[in-house]
Image (cartoon, grey):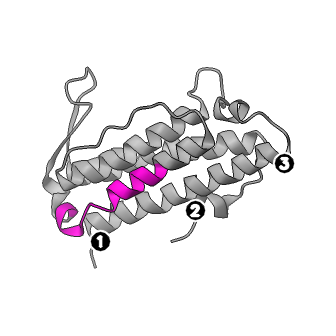
Amino acid sequence: MTISMYAASVPVLKQMLHSLDAILSKAEAHTVNKKIDPAVLLQARLYPDMLPLVVQVQIASDNAKGIAARLAGVDIPSFQDTERTFEELRARIAKTIDFIDTVKPEQVNGSEGRDVVVYKGAPYEMQLRGQTYLIHFGLPNFLFHVTTAYAILRHNGVELGKSDFIGKF
């Protein structure tokens, strides 16, 4: 039995975005319960040379909409990176899920051999086939940023576990 490109991408993106939303909700509640300025967590990093939580979430969102759009052969919606609160980050995630919900299986299935260009025009431009892009770059990159957001919050005392990361499927 084979797995379709849609089944290997869109449901996974949505599952992890819903998990990220729930994790951010717990983080916001943590700041209230512990009387912590939310900006402290939003700007937290695992290491000084890494990007802060707010940027990790923005990049995870960008990766999710990019994967869905590239595989479907549609334009990637552009979101401004202006979020400064948990509420704004959660709204961005909701907007990302709303976009992903517009992508239909028939747009993505069959994209295994479709040419996908990442970082178009940039010095790091990559041209990959759809399946290679999804399995070897798109999903790992997306999951890196979701995992890093989780790790930043866990490192800063937010009570999270593996079930929070995996979420519902």
For the point 84% across and 48% down, which residue is it? 33
Q: Helix, strand or loop at disc 3?
A: helix
Q: CA distance from mark 1 to mark 3?
A: 44 Å
- Residue 168: name its quadrant: bottom right
Of the pair 120 and 135, the residue shown nearer to us = 120
Which sits earlier in the primary sequence, circle 3 or circle 2? 3
Residue situated furthest bottom in the rendering: 1
Residue that badge 1 annotates: 3
Please tell me which residue is depicted at 72% across the width and 45% down the height of the picture: 154
Kind of residue at disc 1: Ile
Q: Single out the residue that lies furthest toward the right.
A: 34
Precedes in sequence: disc 1 or disc 3:
1
Q: Between tags 3 and 2, which lies in front?
A: 3
Residue bearing the label numbered 2:
166
Q: Depth check: 110 or 68 in front?
A: 68
Q: Are marks 2 and 1 in contact (CB under 8 Å)?
A: no
Residue at the spot 23% in from the left edge and 48% down from the top edge: 70
Q: Look at the numbered discs 3 and 2 and tell me whether their residues touch, using CB distance below 8 Å.
A: no
Q: CA distance from mark 2 to mark 1?
A: 20 Å
Identify the residue shown where x is 72% and y is 55%: 160
Packing grade of label 1 (10 A; few <14, some 14-19, many >=20) is: few
Of discs 1 and 3, which sits in the foreground? 3
Closer to the chain start, of discs 2 and 1, is: 1
Q: Nearer the viewer, mark 2 or mark 1?
A: 2
The magenta span reads: 93-108
The dot on residue 33 is 3
Q: Quadrant of residue 167?
A: bottom right
Name the amino acid, label 2: Ile
Identify the element where label 2 is drawn: helix
Count neighbours of disc 2 (C-alpha within 10 A) and say few if under 14, some if 14 to 19, many if 20 or more. Answer: few
Question: Is any part of residue 117 visible from this angle?
Answer: yes
